[in-house]
Amino acid sequence: MLNEATKTKALGRLRRIEGQVQGLQRMIEHEAYCVDILLQISAVQGALEQVEKLLLGRHVESCVADALRSGSRSERQQKIDELLDVFARFRGK
């Protein structure tokens, strides 16, 4: 579960990313230099990765920690498996 601080931080970052994507659209519409567009795309990807890290950290601090502390054996295993799947997806990028 997201706490208010994480939610506020994530939404703020996503709004900035939204602005960056709109800027990318304008760059393409105005036929900006390809390398400049590619650099902006890289910046957006980096910003999205920061949101991923923020949310993953919060998930580990709350959901995973709670399951490890007080969950049943199957709940603990489910959270561990879920986390391993997320790590595998990150590694596959």
Image: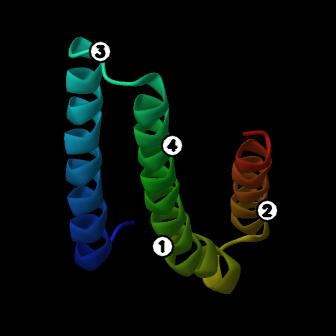
- Asked which quadrant contains residue 63, the reply is bottom right
Q: CA distance from mark 3 to mark 1?
A: 40 Å
| Residue at the spot 69% in from the left edge and 79% down from the top edge | 68
Q: Report which residue position mark 3 lands on.
A: 31
Q: Amino acid at mark 2?
A: Gln
Q: Is residue 61 left or right of residue 22?
A: right
- Asked which quadrant contains residue 92, the reply is top right
Mark 4 or 3, nearer chain start: 3
Badge 1: few (under 14), some or many (20 or more) residues near its Cα, within 10 Å? some
Secondary structure type for disc 3: loop
**The furthest residue to the front:** 33
Q: CA distance from mark 4 to mark 3?
A: 18 Å
Badge 2: few (under 14), some or many (20 or more) residues near its Cα, within 10 Å? some
In the foreground, 80 or 42? 42
Mark 3 or 1, nearer chain start: 3
As displayed, is residue 21 above or below residue 69? above
In the foreground, 36 or 64? 36
Q: Is residue 63 left or right of residue 2?
A: right
Q: Report which residue position mark 2 lands on.
A: 77
Q: Amino acid at mark 1?
A: Arg
**Nearest to viewer (mark 4 / mark 2):** 4
**Nearest to viewer (mark 2 / mark 1):** 1
- The answer to whether the residue labelled 2 contacts the one labelled 3, judged by CB atoms less than 8 Å apart, is no
Q: Quadrant of the C terminus?
A: top right
